[in-house]
Image (spheres, rainbow, N blue to C red):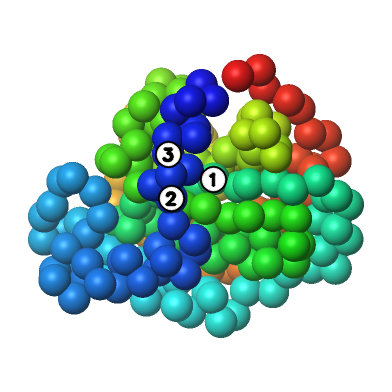
């Protein structure tokens, strides 16, 4: 596991580098990842606008800042993502703002399709769901993971699938409305709980 993680870290981007990558690809009418289509490019364009807005508006609570300040040893937060992913667009700006409150956290991004070995190690219910955050200690051991959605959104998806079999376009729209209203609060609540109860995952 550690070798795969370290291989991916060598191909990682800072948050700003990732944002620049997405912008540059969009200027060529492309998205991140190996698959390319007009639909994925359009999703990426929408998400880029969404992230620009969130980068400016997301507020981190004092409780979150206090909890993050308890991190004394260096950590790397490695996130598997793609530009076309709506959940990533809503959550990455929040996670970046959280990481910025601590000099101990080094936030890194990797593209899912370019890091298949890593993605296969961190599946969610057997699926390559993103964004997926992997928290690493200074020796690149896995401390904890998070994703692909905050807990309330995860429950919303589970409930909708239980009632309807699968998510549809209307639900995806409703989920984006929830994200907009929540303003990153549920993500912060999740991270406060994770930081209070860290668990080492054997590599």
- According to the image, label 1 marks what residue? 78
Q: Which residue is mark 2?
A: 12
Please give the residue where the numbered disc 3 appears in the rendered image.
Answer: 8
Q: Nearer the viewer, residue 198 or 71?
A: 71
Looking at the rendering, which quadrant does residue 10 occupy?
top left
Q: Residues within 10 Å of mark 2 (few under 14, many from 20)?
A: many
Tags 3 and 2 touching, CB below 8 Å: yes
Mark 2–mark 1 contact, CB under 8 Å? yes
Residue at 42% in and 39% down: 8
Can residue 174 be seen from the camera position used here?
no
Please name whichever residue, 175 or 120, is drawn nearer the observer in this view of the structure: 120
Q: Is residue 70 above or below residue 1?
A: below
Q: Nearer the viewer, residue 191 or 182?
A: 191
Q: Earlier in the sequence, mark 2 or mark 1?
A: 2
Query: Image point 85% across, 41% down: which residue?
Result: 196
Q: Are marks 3 and 1 in contact (CB under 8 Å)?
A: yes
């Amino acid at each position: 596991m550690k070798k795969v993680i370290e291989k991916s870290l060598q191909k990682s981007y800072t948050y700003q580098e990732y944002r620049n990558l997405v912008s540059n690809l969009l200027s060529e009418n492309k998205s991140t990842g190996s698959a390319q289509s007009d639909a994925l490019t359009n999703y990426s364009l929408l998400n880029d606008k969404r992230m620009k807005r969130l980068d400016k508006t997301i507020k981190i609570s004092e409780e979150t800042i206090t909890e993050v300040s308890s991190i004394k040893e260096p950590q790397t937060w490695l996130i598997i993502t793609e530009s076309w992913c709506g959940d990533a667009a809503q959550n990455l700006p929040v996670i970046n703002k959280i990481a910025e409150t601590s000099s101990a956290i080094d936030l890194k991004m990797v593209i899912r399709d370019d890091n298949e070995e890593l993605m296969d190690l961190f599946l969610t219910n057997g699926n390559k769901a993103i964004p997926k955050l992997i928290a690493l200690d200074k020796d690149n051991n896995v401390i904890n993971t998070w994703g692909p959605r905050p807990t309330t959104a995860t429950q919303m998806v589970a409930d909708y699938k239980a009632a309807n079999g699968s998510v549809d376009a209307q639900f995806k729209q409703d989920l984006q409305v929830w994200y907009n209203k929540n303003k990153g609060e549920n993500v912060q609540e999740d991270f406060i709980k994770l930081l209070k109860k860290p668990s080492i995952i054997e590599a």
